[in-house]
Amino acid sequence: MDRNFTRIDRIIVSLDEALRISTGGAPSPQRPNPAGDLDAAELDEEQQRHVAGLMRINHSGEVCAQALYAGQAATARDEATRLAMQSAADEEIDHLSWCEDRLRELDSRPSLLNPLWYAGSFAIGAAAGIAGDDWSLGFVRETENQVEAHLQDHLDRLPAGDVRSQAILDQMKVDEARHAAMAEAAGARDLPLPVQRAMAFTAGIMKALAYRI
């Protein structure tokens, strides 16, 4: 028999998902890795460490995205908004898996701080959802716009010839732009400038720590 989940039910389910995702138990991707059979570049030790740092940032960013969408979906008032959040989260699972694949190829690992990133992002997402779906969608749009910008920065900083990392980041960038457009079309509200700046500042701290830890 089908069960109608309450908001509390959805939060409990989301917390269970949090434990799996933040500790390396993400579901399998729905789409193949964009890197496919592309040849791996010959990277020296410093370049390999640098690329691993960039991909660790992106992996942590996807952990945050999962948490953000889960928090928003758990507290969304409108069913259509909740389903849109879930659809975007499903695509972000692909990103999470692709980044994890690339980290393994580079003999590296995800950030040890991922449980912390997840908890903070889930709380922010839940708060945005409680504030109202238009604010929640505005938060999604601004987040995706900032992520798209930092992905371009990472693409510019990749060593020449690292086509495997480039292919992954290119597809992620396309998907993030589509998620921002989805939020815009669904009625996203413009966030106040101080909120946008606070988001960028917080993301900067996460990126600085995830690059190394």
Image (cartoon, grey):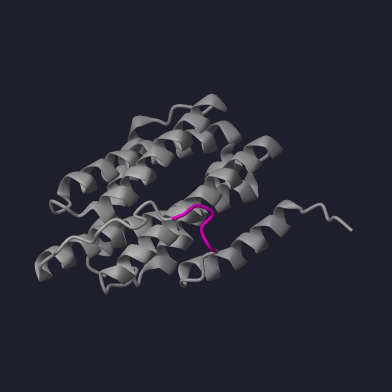
Q: Position of residue 182 (x, y in %)?
A: 52, 31
At horizontal 17% and vertical 62% (from top left) the residue drawn is 50
The residue stretch that appears in magenta: 28-32
Q: Position of residue 161 (x, y in %)?
A: 16, 52
At horizontal 29% and vertical 59% (from top left) the residue drawn is 55
Residue 205 in view here:
no
Q: Position of residue 66 (x, y in %)?
A: 50, 54
Up/down of 144 relative to 154, above or below? above
- Give yes or no for residue 212 being in the magenta stretch: no
Up/down of 46 relative to 38, above or below? below
At horizontal 37% and vertical 54% (from top left) the residue drawn is 61
Q: Quadrant of the N terminus?
A: bottom right
Up/down of 33 relative to 100, above or below? above
The image quadrant that residue 208 belongs to is bottom left
Q: Nearer the viewer, residue 129 or 57?
A: 57
Q: Nearer the viewer, residue 174 or 194?
A: 174
The image quadrant that residue 103 belongs to is bottom left
- Give yes or no for residue 30 being in the magenta stretch: yes
Residue 107 in view here:
yes
Number of numbered tags placed on the structure image = 0
Left/right of residue 195 with respect to residue 205 in the rendered view = right
Q: Main secondary structure of the magenta part?
A: loop
Q: Nearer the viewer, residue 206 or 195?
A: 206
Left/right of residue 124 with respect to residue 153 in the rendered view = right
Q: Position of residue 60 (x, y in %)?
A: 37, 60
Q: Residue furthest right?
A: 1
